[in-house]
Image (cartoon, rainbow, N blue to C red):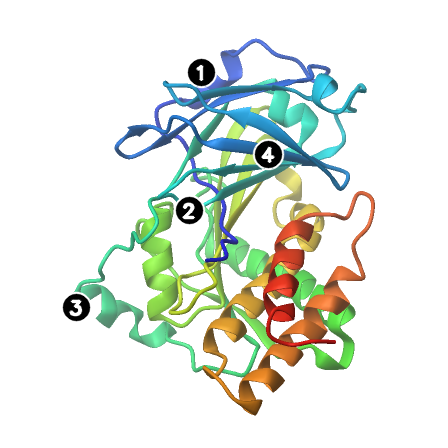
């Protein structure tokens, strides 16, 4: 069964503890811990990806702790400005991916929570009634990304800011997908969806499935200095019936609070979320393909065409989720020959 899944937040470490951890922007060692609600996740495998180069980074110990010396792993000094992708996997858990700059990854211990496979909180009748207005129709290979307003410091949070975030995300993601796929690009939209418990990833997956969302985008921001915010954004692809599992991708960044309502927050997220959107389309379309016959072949060919188009845009410093794209293409190739 093909897995395309990624990460959560570790509640046991406070922001103060993270900031107090010794480590600087020039550090090459990334440390942290992995846990589930049931406790530490021992033996979770870690891989790293830097400028398209993927390496095995060992596994977590009995306490769920891990440590990776990037300079040793890549046999060179790694610049703090480089983008780093970390992937954690363990039997029985959804694979978790985190994306951040090397300087941020090495500046504090990473806190990673893994969600059990097959999890999925049931929605009550009251929940379903509240969500009725947000249920999306099935629309080809396009659909809707649902934006749950970011959890921000009270003095920054406002409906106007949420709408600005929605507009910028829609503008960047739609532009990305249209540029990558050209005439094959589907119709996409981003809708605001107020939701309680927005940082419970299991709940987001259940909600996303109920409202037929292509993905749910959300996040939070904490002040870490004068005028500076630590932003954590998530891209949650809800579960669907079928062999291809969905994904939860996260991006951590720091921005000037004055830029919060500007496109700056999303320039870095643009490529990652755009590619994650294409993967979400592929997962849904492959799961929805007919079980057999010519119509299945045509459905698989259509998915292959836009995955190949997206794969062609990758290269050095633009390599996020390349293994996931290749895995999907390999799955299709087992049934459909060029």
Q: CA distance from mark 1 to mark 2?
A: 27 Å
Relative to 22, does residue 48 appear above or below in the rendering? below
**Cα distance in 3D space between marks 3 and 2:** 27 Å
Q: Quadrant of the C terminus?
A: bottom right
Q: Which residue is mark 2?
A: 94
Q: Residue furthest top?
A: 22
- Give the residue displayed 18% in from the left and 63% down from the top: 124
Check disc 1 and report the residue beneath it. 17
Query: Residue 140's quadrant in the figure?
Result: bottom right
**Disc 4 marks which residue?**
47
Q: Look at the numbered discs 4 and 1 and tell me whether their residues touch, using CB distance below 8 Å.
A: no
Q: Nearer the viewer, mark 4 or mark 3?
A: 4
Q: Secondary structure at mark 4?
A: strand
Of 213 and 335, which appears nearest the observer? 335
Tag 3 residue? 125
Q: Earlier in the sequence, mark 4 or mark 3?
A: 4
- Residue nearest the observer in this picture, 111 or 144: 111
Q: Are marks 4 and 3 in contact (CB under 8 Å)?
A: no
């Amino acid at each position: 069964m093909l897995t395309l899944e990624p990460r959560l937040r570790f509640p046991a470490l406070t922001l103060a503890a993270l900031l107090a951890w010794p480590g600087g922007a020039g550090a090459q060692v990334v440390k942290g811990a992995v846990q589930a609600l049931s406790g530490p996740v021992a033996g979770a495998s870690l891989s790293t990806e830097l400028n398209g180069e993927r390496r095995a980074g060992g596994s977590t110990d009995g306490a769920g702790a891990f440590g990776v010396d990037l300079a040793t792993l890549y046999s060179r000094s790694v610049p703090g400005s480089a983008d780093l992708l970390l992937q954690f996997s363990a039997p029985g858990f959804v694979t978790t991916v985190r994306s951040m700059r090397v300087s941020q990854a090495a500046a504090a211990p990473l806190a990673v929570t893994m969600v059990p496979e097959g999890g999925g909180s049931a929605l009550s009748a009251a929940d379903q009634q509240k969500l009725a207005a947000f249920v999306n129709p099935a629309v080809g290979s396009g659909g809707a990304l649902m934006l749950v307003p970011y959890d921000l410091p009270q003095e920054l949070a406002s409906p106007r800011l949420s709408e600005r975030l929605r507009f910028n995300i829609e503008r960047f993601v739609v532009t990305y997908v249209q540029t990558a796929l050209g005439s094959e690009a589907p119709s996409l939209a981003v809708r605001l969806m107020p939701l309680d418990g927005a940082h419970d990833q299991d709940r987001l997956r259940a909600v996303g499935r109920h409202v037929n969302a292509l993905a749910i985008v959300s996040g939070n921001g904490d002040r870490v200095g004068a005028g500076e915010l630590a932003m954590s954004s998530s891209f949650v692809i809800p579960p669907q019936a079928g062999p291809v599992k969905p994904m939860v991708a996260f991006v951590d960044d720091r921005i000037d609070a004055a830029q919060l309502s500007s496109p700056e927050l999303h320039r870095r997220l643009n490529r990652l979320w755009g590619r994650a959107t294409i993967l979400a389309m592929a997962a849904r379309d492959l799961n929805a393909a007919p079980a057999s016959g010519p119509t299945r072949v045509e459905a698989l060919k259509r998915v292959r065409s836009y995955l190949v188009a997206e794969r062609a845009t990758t290269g050095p410093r633009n390599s996020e989720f390349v293994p996931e794209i290749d895995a999907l293409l390999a799955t299709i190739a087992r049934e459909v020959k060029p």
